[in-house]
Image (spheres, helix red, strand yellow):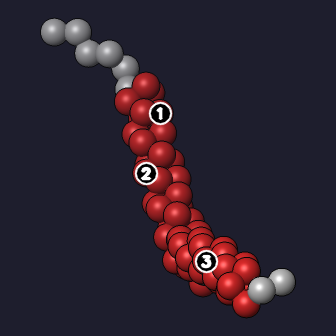
Amino acid sequence: MSLETDLIALNKRVRTLEEAVSKLVTLYSNFASNKEVQELIAVISDELKENKQSIISLESRVEIIEGTPDIDF
C-alpha cells in the first residue's frame, strides 16, 4: 500500500470514529441519571399521595351527601 492509500484509509477511520463519538455524546446528553430518576419518582409519589387524600376526602363528602335525606320545599 502506498502512503496516500494509507492516509485515505486512516482519514476514513477517523471520520467514522468522530461520527461514533458524536452519537455517543448525543446519547449521553439525553440519558437521565439514576439520581434524576429517583427524584422524579419521589415527586410523582408525593403527587399520588396528595391525589389519594383528595379522593378519600371527596368520597367522604359524597357519602355524607348521599346519607342526607332529601328536603322538599
Q: Are marks 2 and 3 in contact (CB under 8 Å)?
A: no
Mark 2 or mark 1: name the one nearer the start of the chain: 2
Q: Residue furthest top?
A: 73
Q: Residue furthest right?
A: 1
Q: Residue furthest left?
A: 73
**Place of residue 38 in the rendered image (x, y in percent of width and height, measured from the top left):** 61, 77
Quadrant of image for the C terminus: top left
Check disc 1 and report the residue beneath it: 63
Under mark 1, the amino acid is Glu
Query: What numbered label is drawn on residue 54?
Result: 2
Query: What numbered label is drawn on residue 15?
Result: 3
Q: CA distance from mark 3 to mark 1?
A: 70 Å
Quadrant of image for the N terminus: bottom right
Crowd rating for badge 1 (residues with CA inside 10 Å; few <14, some 14–19, many 20+): few
Residue 12 placement: quadrant: bottom right
Question: 37 or 52: nearer the eye?
Answer: 37
In the figure, 45 relative to 51: above or below? Answer: below
In the figure, 71 relative to 28: above or below? Answer: above
Crowd rating for badge 3 (residues with CA inside 10 Å; few <14, some 14–19, many 20+): few
Can the viewer see residue 57? Answer: yes
Question: 34 or 63: nearer the eye?
Answer: 34
Foreground mark, 2 or 1? 2
Mark 3 or mark 1: name the one nearer the start of the chain: 3
Crowd rating for badge 2 (residues with CA inside 10 Å; few <14, some 14–19, many 20+): few
